[in-house]
Image (cartoon, rainbow, N blue to C red):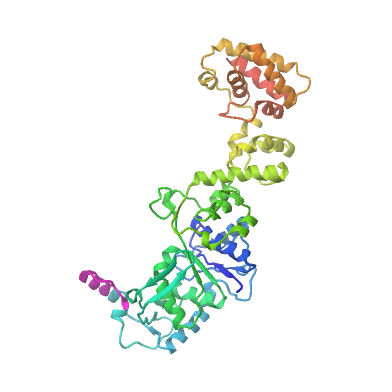
Amino acid sequence: MKVVTRFAPSPTGYIHIGNVRSAIYPYLLAKQNAGKMILRIEDTDRERYVEGATELIEDTLEWLGLNWDEGPIIGGPHAPYFQSERKSIYHDYARRLIESGRAYADPTPSEEIAKYREKCSKEKIPFLYRNFRPENTPEWEPGIPLRFKAEPKEYAWHDEVMGDMHAGPEVLDDIILIKKDGYPTYNFAHIVDDAEMGVTHVMRGVEYLSSTPNYLALYEALNLERPKLVSLPHILAPTGNKKLGKRDGAKSVTEYRDDGVLAEAMLNYLACLGWNDGTEQEIYTKDQLIKNFSLERIQSSGARYDETKLLWYSGQWIRKIFDEQGVDVLYERTAGFWPEVADNFNNDYKRRVLSIIYDRLKTLSDLREMTAYFFAAPAIDIDMLLQNKFLKKLSEAELESTLKTVISELTKLEDWNADSLQNTLNNLLELTNKKPAELFSLIRIAVSFAPFSPALNLTLEVLGRDESLARLNSVARAI
């Protein structure tokens, strides 16, 4: 069997973490089995449609490297891939159900349906529309809602994640197939589209599990083969007690991209959020994920979202790219993330800065704050010196004297490189009779006035002789 999966988002706003994981697993399964993944846009809910949302979905998938095999932009044998353009297909299937006596037009006003619900509520019984099914129904035509005519029975099925499932006849109901506006409901459209497009594995959130019996009834009524069903557990809020939502602080995927989280890190983290291959491995390339992925290893319980872990992954991937592919490759990814003043410096200088700071980055946007002092002399903050935990025991006179000794020794250096700078710094420990934490903190703060910086000898080497000595002299005079 050729594996065919699909990702079928609704263009109703930004694409969030949960949406993306629902694209990753179908992609991995399809690629692992030399199959294909279809991108289908479920845009029949016209009231919630957001202009530009489809382009945002496409852009996000392309950024993550989740290239679809059929769908918008690239086309394919099952076009169109926008449900709003497939209305005639749904109507054809609807007529098949009408002809077989499994669907009926229902002009019942919504106010009347509300009364049925209220009646059931007062009697404390479940509301099932099939118990209020109208007797004399008109011939169906677009403009009148069309309902499925349920035949209550028991259903059993196997879910690839949740295992063997069972539901009784009490959950079957007369669900709406075609709305008053002529567009299909999700409950109907996805059944038709998956069948038409040859989808073999339907992956979606576990929230659809309760609706599965109605879906099975539709497969049966239309004489369609059931695909394999894969229910993906929720991504949970950081508190772990509910499904992750916008109110829980999770940003859109594009916001994380704009904040400098690497695509490789996002893909890696979300793939492992609710799945593992049984090993202790955490860092996976896309190819490794394709090779190792399996439905059997998707956990059946929800996975808690942890932004700190995502940022850890991003930092790991920054180091991985630098270590394995070099500074030039990583530098190409940094455009737009440098402090504005860095525009005045050439690429070679920025590459040198990147090569000594990269292992402290969690996201590329950290460059703005962590490298600013490499491009402009920082404002002198004597309080930062005096309040430093390693320097607060030293008097201002002692700080000034120590800095002057440092300046004197560094001025003598003929070769301003990392090795000679380190040798001089080591000699200064004896000359000043200071502990490493004291001496090196003093010099580091004096040249950067930053909370932290790379190795001191590397920082001085990149800043250069003239700039380093100028900053040290300015601080010495200011104390």
Extreme residue toward the right, this view: 414
For image coordinates 71% across by 18% down, the residue present is 410
Q: Across the whole image, how many numbered discs are drawn on residues?
A: 0
Q: Main secondary structure of the magenta part?
A: helix
Taking the view exactly as shown, the residue that stands out farthest to the left is 123
Image location of residue 66, percent across then percent down: 61, 60
Image height check: is 380 above or below 127?
above
Q: Quadrant of the N terminus?
A: bottom right
Side of 122 relative to 66 (left or right): left
Q: Is residue 354 above or below residue 248?
A: above
Q: Is residue 62 found left or right of 84 in the rendered image?
A: right
State the residue at coordinates (75%, 16%): 412
Q: Position of residue 464 (x, y in %)?
A: 72, 26
Q: Is residue 115 within the magenta segment?
A: yes
The answer to which image quadrant residue 440 occupies is top right
Residue 280 part of the magenta-drawn span: no
- Does residue 182 appear in the picture of this structure? yes
In this rendered view, identify the residue nearer to me: 383 or 208. Answer: 208
Q: Which corner quadrant of the image does residue 339 belong to?
A: top right
In the displayed image of the protein, which residue is found farthest to the front? 278
Q: Nearer the viewer, residue 281 or 29?
A: 281
Q: Position of residue 244 (x, y in %)?
A: 43, 54
- Give, as a single range, the part of the protein colored magenta: 114-129
Residue 294: image quadrant is bottom right
Where is residue 147? Give x, y as percent. 39, 80
Q: Nearer the viewer, residue 279 or 408?
A: 279
Q: Quadrant of the C terminus?
A: top right
| Above-or-below relation of 208 to 344 | below
